[in-house]
Image (cartoon, coloured by chain):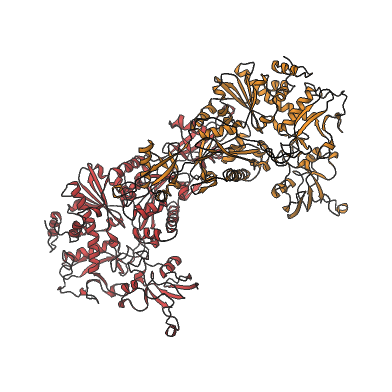
Chain colours: A red, B orange
Amino acid sequence: MSGKYKVIFQPSGRRGEIEEDKTLLEAAQMLGVDLESICGGKGTCGKCKVRIEEGYFEKDAMESGMSHLTPMSDVERKFIKAGDGPQMRLACSATVQGDVKVFVPEKSRAGKQIVRKAARDIIIALDPAVKRYYIELQAPGLHDLSRGDFERIGNALREQYGLDDIDIDYVILRDIQNILRKGEWKVTVSVWMDREIIKVEPGFVESSYGIAIDVGTTTVAAYLCDMNTGKVLNTESMMNPQVPYGEDVMSRITYAMTNDSGLETMRKTLIEGLNELIAKVTSEIRLNGTKGGHTIIDMTVVFNTAMHHIFLGFNPEYIGRSPFIPALQEPIDIKARDMGIDINPASYIHVLPIEAGFVGADNVGVLIAEEPYNADDMVLIIDIGTNGELLLGNKDAVYSTSCATGPAFEGAQIKFGMRAAPGAIEKVRIDPGTKDPEYMVIGKADWHTHIEKIDAKGLCGSGIIDVITEMFKAGIIDKSGKFVMDLDTPRVRRDAEGKPEYVLAWSDETSIGTDITVTQGDVRALQLAKGALYAGAKLMMKKLGIEKLDRVVLAGAFGSHIDTEAAMTLGMFPDCNIEKVYAVGNAAGDGARMALLNRGKRIEAREKARWVNFVEIAVEPEFEKEFMMAMHIPHMKDRFPNLKALLEKNNVPVKVKG
Amino acid sequence: MSGKYKVIFQPSGRRGEIEEDKTLLEAAQMLGVDLESICGGKGTCGKCKVRIEEGYFEKDAMESGMSHLTPMSDVERKFIKAGDGPQMRLACSATVQGDVKVFVPEKSRAGKQIVRKAARDIIIALDPAVKRYYIELQAPGLHDLSRGDFERIGNALREQYGLDDIDIDYVILRDIQNILRKGEWKVTVSVWMDREIIKVEPGFVESSYGIAIDVGTTTVAAYLCDMNTGKVLNTESMMNPQVPYGEDVMSRITYAMTNDSGLETMRKTLIEGLNELIAKVTSEIRLNGTKGGHTIIDMTVVFNTAMHHIFLGFNPEYIGRSPFIPALQEPIDIKARDMGIDINPASYIHVLPIEAGFVGADNVGVLIAEEPYNADDMVLIIDIGTNGELLLGNKDAVYSTSCATGPAFEGAQIKFGMRAAPGAIEKVRIDPGTKDPEYMVIGKADWHTHIEKIDAKGLCGSGIIDVITEMFKAGIIDKSGKFVMDLDTPRVRRDAEGKPEYVLAWSDETSIGTDITVTQGDVRALQLAKGALYAGAKLMMKKLGIEKLDRVVLAGAFGSHIDTEAAMTLGMFPDCNIEKVYAVGNAAGDGARMALLNRGKRIEAREKARWVNFVEIAVEPEFEKEFMMAMHIPHMKDRFPNLKALLEKNNVPVKVKG
């Protein structure tokens, strides 16, 4: 017998009737409850712990032995510890069998992520794909017997602007009669790629707007651009609305493969989210009787290969497994109305090309923004989003690869890991003498307005890199990542299972009522992540036959927030002059903007995406050995002359090979 | 106070609740009642006479003086005669004010028109716009790392067929992953204009279907073609579903202009009708898991300018009034899904170009089917549909024009005129001695199956031409069209108002219980119609500087049913060797088929539509004089040497100038 049961979530108070056999995680997603789920419900992250306040046992449980939830699973037994307190369950495992009241502890709340994808100034020649032409026609008389309205526009474009054989979108064509007459035969015509009319407006219209979008696995950023000046007029960002279906790429591919119409569900969710974002970023715009998204005449978009596939409605299954074949590599222009995107319906959405199975259009965005193919010096570009992608080379050759860094940089697989949301520790310094830390916590309120100091709740990516690097520099862990146990500090201790950990914050400094610690497992997770990046860079250097890097560019929002010294000390990349290591912010978004403002950049993207040598790092025979050596901090064998000098200058007691 | 009233139509018994102030004609259209309305409710044709059986007066009319209908209008007083019987009203004028029961006399019923738009054999080189390519790909391996599914198809088309830089429709692209795998890397790809993939099917698919459609004002014909052989596999036709909004072009333009969303209503009605027609003509087709319309990969369509505009959603207002500016003259290719046409959604519908304000794509169809631009001899092509269009010329120059023939050829403005439906007299011979006629009536049942003889009800177009020509040959009317009154026959008489008429059928031979007569007004209406055609041809001959025609081609379904001798005797066109006067049937539809089967014909259509010299006959200074002279039978002054010889050979007593 199947029914519906009342489920209440606290402290939000959200409630609803939930069908039997839905998991509590699904219930939380349906009811819009803020509940962390990094693995997307696969039972691998253990982040969705909830406390069952009513219904853990039936009222007469002593007699019936029945619960209002399915029995504890093995997965739950693995993650739920005695220290978590009574009546805890994993929301992704426990399914509804009766009425329940659920409490979401602060630690299990995802929080509103602080999105920092601001746009930097880019200087680029304006040559957009959509250009506007103002034309004045004579009102038709009997001498015009053999010329239709459309042909008259065509003639004017030919005579006044030298544009030949221009087509017109059918939905626009349907309106030209009225627009020509409304504008008294003076109109502004928007032409895409010197080829097709995609908008006709009455009178002279000067303003022109475009939008560039970067769909990250976690964050989506939209840049509203003035197409006459190239300036960014407004920026908005949001969480990728697909996050409830899985926080990383593989979770979403799995969701698409294992759920009926899972792909379509995620695609629609993304399109709806993009439409909300577009409405928000254009909310101030009024143009010639049109407002909001419909004023937008051109749009570019970048994303990784999985987001690319889901956005376009392709099955992502085949890019998720060998031989990693995408449905489409080339750039494509799709009518906004065919995609369901709420901009001018006749406009095209330009989807940048992807490079290979796991190197997406976002990396092509980085490529055309940073232009390593024009560089004389040898540059390594690391784009750390939810995935890690590397570009290495100069004008002679550029290699690219994708690194399975895992989600450690984003806080998953880290005991107290969390996203860069209020309460996250983002910077750490440890006194090498006392081993006591200082740390900074991300405050409440928008990052650009007043910030309210709050207590710590966990560690975000930059905090994780910082704390582990500082632990290394303070001698709390050695170069192999192992804890040094004979230190004179209560902060280094063993947990209930006897495993070492470092107490970063005592419980009275936190908002979660327990100590925030860094465990041996956390250190290992970060070693795996940074080791993958380093090994990738190293193998590409070998392919290029080079021994040192001239420059390291950290791209991506995450790259902007990590300490460059900490990153190099940890060994996220090979040794380099620290003056030549710098962050560029969201370079993928910059590339999308460049392609929006300059059609030459679209051609460049297409050509360079093909020209770049993609290397599948994981199949290289040397990978395993390189990876193993790169797990060490900063590396097992490689020399770091620049780092050595830097550490010595700063009186850091640990030694590295110079 | 506004309400709804019960309206019943007899003899069909159709009934419904109709809002106050709707006309009875609107009520009939809403209820699907078969009621003739040639002018579309404008009060100019007088064909929608109905008898009010209940509600003509209120029950207590003696006291209240109130009717359940609005009072008799001036328009009604003009058309309703004493002889029509009691309680007659014009359905387009009388509006509902209470419950009414209405009887539709047989004379006012439109009847199911017999549509005769069969396809003739045309011989044309096959070079369709959509071509199919079978490709076999290797299943991808790790060596294919940098090639997506789409790029693999693109490479195969390039390597195996020399097709470069092929695009793909987005909706098709979304499916290729599954199709490639379903077909085990063997697929059949349909490519439009060597440019864009519009279909991908698993495995080897040989069959290929296309459809050509001729949207006439009255009749719509669809030709299903085998794109591999060019053969017509099936033909279907239907009444244009817009007929209820007006039987002629001007009525429909008026409907679009004077009704809120009238244009959209007619457009949707047409699209729905076309989809039904497409479903019907393809109902036998099964292809690779697809059936019906979705098997169709290409479609062409022709129509007059008004139908062209309504189909495409253009306001037809501006082609209905000076300076007659169409929205679009050029050919256009529109995605089937954008039009809402149920064929393969990614396919394009090719709309042939129009020539000018009133010379449509249908005439361009005639042009490319008959190819006067390749002729050595001087040919006149007359396409009589609901409008009359003329083409005249040879390889050196071709002129075109549109003639306001009025609807006389279709039976409107003719007292007993009707469409070519069962009961229509279609052929007439009159004995010059006795002045008695012989006639043929269109039988019941489909024209190609068993025909049941029935009594006459009226005259269709070919019958009208026949009877008036025969009346002239028998001396019943003179060359000016005036009745000769001193003949020894009861068939020539004066009506109640003293006007002369000829009794073609006595009441006991008819199904309508009255004599079927040809009136002086009928003769005048036909003289106006044929005079317009003749004057048009004459003025074009003057422009070309020629004195005689080498050949006359009668195009259109109507042209196939008129007697060529009668047409020349009447003076529908200048003198010509009768051996060189012939009908070609639906040449517009032939042209649409040719454009479907051969893309060169599309280019030819575009070029020749521009090359043809369109003449607006009505604005020529000489038109009025020529028109007046052409009203005579066969003409006031022109010589008819061929006709003279023919009449003499047949011992016809009347004389024409030789």
Quadrant of the frame with the C terminus of chain B: top right
Q: Residue furthest top?
A: B658
Nearer to the camera, A84 or B119? B119
Nearer to the camera, A362 or B275? B275
- Image quadrant assignment for residue A37: bottom left
Rendering coords of residue B132 (x, y %): 45, 39
The answer to whether A34 is drawn above or below residue B440 in the figure is below
Q: Residue furthest front?
A: B450
Task: Evaluate whether residue B55 shows in this view.
Answer: no
Residue depicted at 23% across the width and 56% down the height:
A533
Quadrant of the frame with the N terminus of chain B: bottom right
The answer to whether A267 is drawn above or below residue A188 in the figure is below
Rendering coords of residue A423 (x, y %): 32, 67
Nearer to the camera, B434 or A416? B434
Residue depicted at 45% across the width and 66% down the height:
A30
Tally of numbered tags:
0
The answer to whether A560 is drawn above or below residue A421 in the figure is above
Nearer to the camera, A640 or A433? A640
Task: Evaluate whether residue B300 shows in this view.
Answer: yes
Rendering coords of residue A133 (x, y %): 45, 36
Q: Would residue B39 be found to the left or right of residue A169 on screen? A: right
Rendering coords of residue A605 (x, y %): 32, 43
Q: Residue furthest bottom?
A: A63
